[in-house]
Image: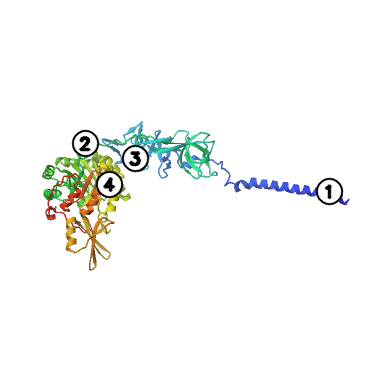
Amino acid sequence: MGSRSRKKNTKGGAAAILFRLLLCLGLIILLFLAFGTKLFARWLPSSEKKDLSEWFEVEGDEIRLYLDGQMEAEQTGLYRFDHVYLPLSYVRGQVNMRFFENSDKTVSMTLPGEEQLFDAHSYENGAPVLLSEGGDSYILLDTVEKYTSLEDMSYTGENDGPYRVFLYRGGSEGSYAYARKKSAVRTRMSQTAPILDTPAKDERVLLFDQKDEWCRVLTDAGVIGYMPARDLENTESFTRPDTWTMPGASHYHMDEKVVMGWHSLVGTAANEYLESLVANTGGALNVVSPTWIQISDADGSFENYATEDYVEKAHAAGIQVWAAVDNFNQPGGLQDFSTGAFFSDREKRADFIRRLVAEVQRFHIDGINLDFEGISAEAGPAYVQMIRELSNVCRDTGIVLSVDNYVPYTYNSHYELGEQALYADYIVIMGYDEHTGKDVGSVSSQPWFEDGILRALDEVPAEQLIGAVPFYTRRWEISGTGVSSYSTGMMEADRYAADHGISLSWNEECGQFYGELREGAVTTKIWMEDITSLTLKSDFLKSYDPAGIAAWRLGYEPASVWEVLDWNGKRRETGDIAESEANDGNQDNQTE
């Protein structure tokens, strides 16, 4: 009986264990159902759908904008009159800078040989070209594409959900890929992220980039997001066509290399020194640019010191005259004239061009040499627009147009060298004033000069580029924390060094002779510009076969320098012209 009792107890114990196991399993299942999905959510694919209005962050008639696959986060377009409108500021900054907004809210489009003005009465494809809303200006996408190599994919239909437009520059590269299977496009590179779209098997998507195991894509439904790279195959590359080409301008080019010198003057009396200045060059000079036309007032008035006799003498010597036009020689031009405000006004801009060209024609001057300096980034677009419009008038009237520019850097990029070169005949790079003010150093060291020319050649065709060299240096006087500089012509600098016993030695690093002198508490430093340093600059320029060479300024140089600048092999032997004879009455030494 004892053994039967043990057997019965064994069976009962097994059943109890089984029951407990089943109970535990049930509890585990209940716990998993209650909490497991949350615990494992980070590894499980999400089936959550993302609201597209929330994703694109636009509503109503707003349009989300993308350019070459990148979202414009700060600005949105508008959908009006069944057409797409883009913010004009966005178009100018990212798409086409030539749409220039005038101060009266009209928009100018200036191309070589063509002028268009859009105003409140301008229409394109049945819709107004311009809109104003909330104080902001908008322009019709159809009009933008008429003057820009640009194509678009627009999702602005009745069933397209939040409006969005994808813009692509002509000539840009792209890639397509195909879905291996039905897949999910998600908001971020994770399978737990919400779903934006589900491309079907073999559906083509536009591929932007790949990072790790994810690709950023645009689907046929106009949804941009992330898709697993393993779900894509058969990648195809392509180049978008150019839908518009900038009409070429007919640029004037001399039959020989330009060898230009500036003649600095204030007043007509200094015109009498032309013959002595030219004689010093021995016939090497073929362009002279007298600083004749100087803006003198806020209203765009200017002084003009041109004389017919000067032009006749230059022409008799086989020299063209390109009148310099500046904004800094007259106190009113320097202090009162606002380049940006004045040239933003289309009527003032047109009047200035008319008056300028009339003066050039009145004196039978061959060309204009624009020398506007100190222009702010805000004023840059208006200045460049003036160049565009002036170039068309110059081309129609047979006037050569050259524009002076600083050595290009990021901080002066608003001068837009490349854009200038599309319109003007010549672009002059002023390869001097490397150090000014309190910044002690060379006026034009060889490495700095070379770097500036190479930077310019990235934007300007060599056949339009004129490299300008200095005929001067600066004498620096340093006392404690005080710094004074004196602009000094080459011959005067030589005399100063000799008279004061300054020993000069060649500085290989800057490509110039350098000397210094300490007298009491004052240290004088000077980096000399001479025939050796100018030879280095001239040879470097020649190696890139540019349009020519220029020099600031005539009267500062010994005649021997023109052996170096005689790019056309025309120089005759001549003795040095005394500096005092060549002096045009300007103050050559000014403390800065």
> Which mark, residue 396?
2
Look at the numbered discs 4 and 3 and tell me whether their residues touch, using CB distance below 8 Å: no
Q: The residue tagged with tag 2: helix, strand or loop?
A: helix
- The way the protein has been coloured in the rendering is rainbow
Q: Which amino acid does label 2 sit on?
A: Asp
Which of pointers 1 and 3 lies earlier in the amino acid sequence? 1
Quarter placement of the C terminus: bottom left
- Using the image, tell me which numbered label, if any, was put on residue 213: none
Q: Distance between the residues labelled 4 and 1?
A: 106 Å
Reading the chain from its start, which is encountered first: label 4 or label 1?
1
Instruction: Give the SS element for disc 3.
Output: loop
Using the image as rendered, state which of residue 289 and residue 39 is in the foreground.
289
Asked if the residue at tag 1 contacts the one at tag 2, i.e. Cβ–Cβ closer than 8 Å, the answer is no
Residue 340: assigned label: 4
Cα separation between marks 4 and 3: 19 Å
Distance from the alpha carbon under mark 2 to that under mark 1: 119 Å
- The CA span between labels 2 and 3 is 25 Å
Circles 1 and 3: CB distance less than 8 Å?
no
Q: Quadrant of residue 165?
A: top left
Q: In this view, does 392 lie to the left or right of 178?
A: left
Q: Earlier in the sequence, mark 4 or mark 3?
A: 3
Extreme right residue here?
A: 1
**Mark 1 Cα-neighbour bin, 10 Å: few <14, some 14–19, many ≥20:** few
Query: Mark 1 highlights which residue?
Result: 8
User: Could you say whether the residue bearing mark 4 is in a helix, strand or loop?
Assistant: helix
Q: Please report whichever mark, 2 or 3, sits nearer to the chain's N-terminal start.
A: 3
Pointer 3 residue: 96
Q: Which amino acid does label 3 sit on?
A: Asn
Image x and y of residue 196, in percent: 51, 40
Task: Say above or below: 199 vs 449.
Answer: above
